Image (cartoon, helix red, strand yellow):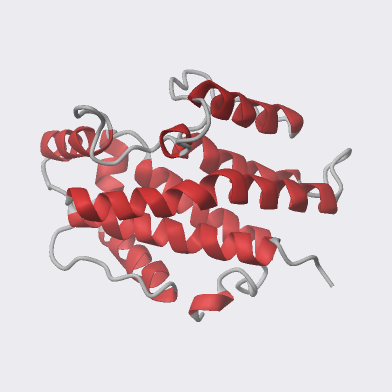
Amino acid sequence: MTKTEISSRAPAGGTLGDVRTALYRFLLRTFEHPSHDQHRWLTSRPFREALDGVCGQFDVDVPTGRLFAADYTEYEAAYIATFDVGLPAPPIVLLASHYHRTEPAPRIVHEHILFYRRFGMKLAEGNIEQADHLLNELAFLIHLDNTAGAPGFDDESVRCARRDFLSRHTGRWVPLATDRAVRKDPPAIYIALLRLLAAAVGQDLELTSVPDG
């Protein structure tokens, strides 16, 4: 597949939503909070091969050499130092409200909650992140693909919701987070992943903004 084909042509037996959902699930698992199971996956050959493939589709360079520390404790410490701790903020902030400088953070968080509620998505049990955290946004974008065609949710309303959510939130702040990451110089793999995410949501927004037919 070429760069522009990932959202316009699905593999055999798949649909547009299948391709998009698979990519967002891949990114969601990659950005999740550290666990031993996730670490084993991130340091495996299948992950490297999958990352090389999808980054190639979006013209994103993958760092050479080892992507993540082989030792779990070192990997966890690097993740926490990149996304969770820092003064006055972590090197890379994964909250939409952090980048909406002209609006109060509670308003942005509440707007996310309204989006989720309107389309029947409940945050997973034990989820401690704010509603506007990247992990919740990705979960919502996946949920929208699963919602399309369900009773009470016509395709056009779901498409419009996707367009509005991307333009208002994910597609707006992720490029800013990517620029911030380049300035803060975190582990190179996280810059590559953010560039991949920015390219994916940008293309998603572009295609979603064009009505079918």
Q: Count numbered badges in the picture.
A: 0
**Seen in the image, is 209 located left or right of residue 35?**
right
**52 left or right of 127 in image:** left
Where is residue 194 shown, x and y percent of the image? 36, 54
At horizontal 61% and vertical 59% (from top left) the residue drawn is 205
Tell me: residue 53, above or below residue 195: below
- Residue 25: percent from the left, percent from the top? 50, 49
- Whether residue 186 is visible, yes or no, is no
Q: Quadrant of residue 161?
A: top right
Which quadrant of the figure contains the C terminus?
Answer: bottom right
Q: Nearer the viewer, residue 126 or 140?
A: 140
Tell me the residue at 50%/35% (across/down): 102
> Which residue is rendered at x = 54% and y = 56% of the image?
22
| Residue occupying the point 55% across, 26% down | 109
- Residue 199 in picture, x, y percent from top left: 46, 64
The residue lying furthest to the front in this view is: 102
Asked whether residue 173 is in view, the answer is yes
Residue 212 coordinates in the image, percent (x, y): 81, 68
- Image quadrant where residue 203 sits: bottom right
